[in-house]
Amino acid sequence: MKVSDYINEAWEAVTAAGVPEELQELAFKEALTYLRQASTQPVDRLHPGLPHESSPRPSEAGNDDEDAPDLNSFLDKLSLESGADREALEHLYNVEGNVIHLRPPARQLGSNKKEKCLRIATLLVPAYVSRTGEQRVPAQAVRNECKAKNCLDQHFAANMNALRQITYGGSGNKRDFVLGGNWESFFRDAVEAVIGEPGATEDDS
């Protein structure tokens, strides 16, 4: 099963269960973990760059150092592919299992909800593509981060039409993002807009 399939199936389970909105993010993470554990094929065979299920996640181990080598490899690869400053990326991303989060607070992502959602998509889609090697990124991964940053609203789908070098499409729970060519300059611009000078970002949200 692909990472995109895990994410889509986990979200479908959460919505079908009628989980209250304020608990959906936690329920989604738990459902995703359960699906990965239940799979008969080891996750590291599907995506060798991702942590094996037997490795403790930061929330379980209580120590971010457990994921440090994998996070560093991810940041090194993304920096090489995009041309973005490696130190800036370190201030920008955090990884929990298969989920990529943005470290900066919502106020640094834009001046309104549309701008914030577009910037989140611009930063997350290339990151997921770099980490998984898959060109398609489930829309729910971006929606969840927008929700965590309090900028998700009913105009999400329409706003995504303004993305550059990233295509948003599909229907129902099968919507996804596809990374196009020549995305690197738009990605670097987004990184610079959020981070500015390396070291200027606080790790709050």
Image (cartoon, grey):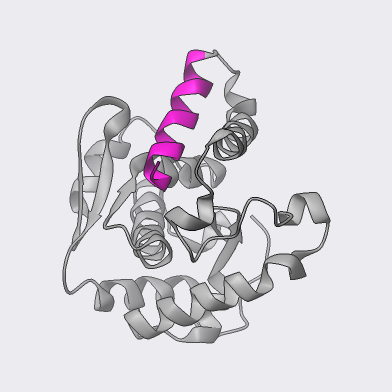
Which residue reaches farthest right? 62
Across and down, in percent, residue 56 comes to 74, 55
Q: Is residue 83 left or right of residue 87?
A: left
Q: Quadrant of the N terminus?
A: top left
Residue 204 or residue 102, whichever sits in front: 102
Vertical relation: 115 (above or below) 27: below
Vertical relation: 74 (above or below) 148: below
Q: Judge whether residue 142 is colored magenta.
A: no
Magenta highlight: main SS? helix
Vertical relation: 22 (above or below) 99: above
Q: Is residue 94 left or right of residue 154?
A: right
Across and down, in percent, residue 41 comes to 50, 44
Q: Residue at x 60, y 63 (%)?
A: 94
Q: Which residues are magenta?
A: 1-16
Residue 46 or residue 186, whichever sits in front: 46
Across and down, in percent, residue 121 comes to 36, 55
Number of numbered discs overlaid on the protein picture? 0
Q: Judge whether residue 11 is colored magenta.
A: yes
Q: Residue at x 17, y 74 (%)?
A: 182
Q: Residue at x 26, y 78 (%)?
A: 185
Residue 111 or residue 13, whichever sits in front: 13
